[in-house]
């Protein structure tokens, strides 16, 4: 077994931030297994092109032979599993790819990992870890006065994305309980920061605000989410990988609950400050209420006390400082935004927003 780690979905938003920070903070090599779907962008990792500690392997986690060959060739000591279909609205428009990748793909990855792990030498088998990256959405919605979800809360997913992630979490636990695979599970809050595909709330609103386009808020905009800066998530995953207890679940929260409308107006004010444009005027006037997402969960929040108590991790960024960094990043990287907002992206924007009554 080598010092290499295998990251799945490393060309996506969180995965690419994770690989960039891993290469900065740790010495061991990284293999990135990614199918390069619409959400995968190898340009996020362009700075590692000549780095001998990084390699991209383009393939599907659901391709057993491909996964088996990759494991045999690179002999990783750990797998960090990000690869997934990740956008709730797309899962409502078309659930099937979510089941294929998030459920079946995860099961195939687990099965090939189990075979690989079972044949390792004793010492290597004990050191090996499979870390599965999951979401707060598996628990469904909180009421206004409810306490944030703790580890062990009942699963109650309400949309196809959340249901597929819940199924994946159960499979990961099943591989641990049935075969002893040394797994770790992390469930995190909504992430934000650089390289997030602009179908998600914060980059979408930032780029639309910059250009003076409508800001489509679903329903009454009073749904709330807990927001976690992506760098904090990456640091938490490294901590769990290195010091987490096998078979345990850890909640990674940002301690930053905000209502959607408040997030959008905060973005408007930041874009006004950083890129004032008299032709557009105050961006708050671009807010447009559109038809709600079906089954829209009102509130998500995670209790991250276990991470602090057991592993000494806490988020270092608060929402306001993180949002300022994120908005600044999108404004400073117009070429990145341009490169991802091409054909498939524009089709999605037309499909999702024209049908909702925003143009
Ligand atoms: P993303 O959509 O930005 O990236 C997903 C990546 O997975 C892409 O690079 C894509 O090409 C790749 N991929 C998709 N299907 C694949 C397949 N079959 N085989 C190999 N690669 C495949 O997602 P993200 O926002 O970076 O999320 C990463 C993980 O974190 C997901 O598992 C998601 O459920 C979880 N998560 C995300 C958030 C969030 O706020 N973004 C919060 C909690 C948990
Ligand atoms: P999103 O970034 O899609 O993450 P998730 O659904 O996983 O929480 O959305 C965050 C919140 O913002 C969610 O409550 C839906 C809402 N939203 C809008 O109001 N308008 C939009 O255009 C988008 C993409 C999201």
Image (spheres, rainbow, N blue to C red):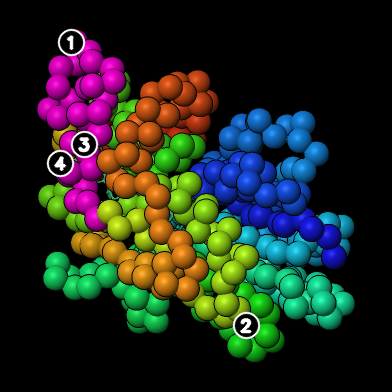
Question: Mark 4 or mark 3, which has the lower sequence index?
Answer: 3
The Cα atoms of the two marked residues, 1 and 4, are separated by 24 Å
The Cα atoms of the two marked residues, 2 and 1, are separated by 59 Å
The residue sitting at 59% across, 44% down in the picture is 21
The Cα atoms of the two marked residues, 3 and 1, are separated by 19 Å
Q: Is residue 227 above or below residue 76?
A: above
Crowdedness near tag 2: few (<14), some (14–19) or many (≥20) residues, C-alpha within 10 Å: some
Q: Are marks 2 and 1 in contact (CB under 8 Å)?
A: no
Left or right of 199 in this view: 174: right
Question: Mark 3 or mark 1, which has the lower sequence index?
Answer: 3
- Which residue is denoted by mark 4 in the rendering? 289
Q: Element at badge 4?
A: strand
The Cα atoms of the two marked residues, 2 and 4, are separated by 45 Å
Left or right of 141 in this view: 43: right
The residue sitting at 68% across, 49% down in the picture is 26
The residue sitting at 72% across, 61% down in the picture is 63
């Amino acid at each position: 077994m080598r010092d290499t780690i295998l990251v799945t979905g490393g060309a996506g938003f969180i995965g690419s931030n994770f690989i960039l920070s891993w290469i900065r903070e740790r010495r061991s090599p990284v293999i990135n297994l990614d199918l390069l779907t619409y959400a995968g962008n190898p340009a996020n990792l362009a700075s590692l092109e000549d780095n001998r500690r990084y390699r991209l392997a383009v393939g599907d986690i659901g391709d057993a032979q491909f996964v088996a060959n990759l494991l045999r060739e690179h002999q990783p000591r750990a797998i960090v599993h990000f690869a997934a279909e990740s956008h709730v609205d797309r899962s409502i428009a078309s659930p099937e790819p979510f089941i294929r990748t998030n459920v079946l793909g995860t099961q195939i990855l687990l099965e090939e990992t189990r075979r690989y792990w079972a044949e390792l030498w004793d010492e290597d088998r004990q050191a090996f870890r499979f870390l599965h990256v999951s979401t707060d959405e598996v628990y469904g919605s909180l009421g206004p006065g409810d306490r944030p979800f703790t580890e062990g809360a009942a699963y109650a997913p309400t949309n196809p994305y959340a249901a597929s992630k819940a199924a994946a979490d159960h499979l990961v636990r099943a591989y641990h309980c049935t075969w002893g695979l040394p797994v770790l599970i992390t469930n995190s809050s909504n992430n934000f920061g650089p390289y997030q595909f602009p179908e998600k709330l914060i980059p979408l609103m930032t780029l639309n605000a910059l250009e003076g386009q409508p800001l489509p808020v679903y329903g009454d905009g009073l749904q709330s989410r807990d927001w976690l800066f992506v760098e904090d998530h990456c640091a938490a995953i490294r901590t769990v990988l290195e010091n987490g207890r096998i078979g345990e679940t850890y909640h990674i929260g940002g301690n930053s609950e905000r209502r959607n409308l408040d997030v959008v107006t905060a973005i408007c004010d930041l874009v006004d400050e950083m890129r004032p444009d008299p032709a557009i005027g105050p961006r708050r006037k671009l807010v447009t209420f559109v038809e709600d997402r079906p089954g829209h969960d009102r509130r998500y929040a995670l209790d991250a006390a276990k991470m602090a108590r057991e592993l000494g991790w806490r988020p270092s960024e608060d929402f306001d400082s993180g949002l300022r960094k994120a908005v600044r990043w999108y404004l400073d990287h117009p070429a990145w935004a341009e490169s991802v907002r091409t054909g498939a992206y524009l089709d999605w924007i037309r499909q999702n927003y024209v049908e909702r009554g925003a143009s």
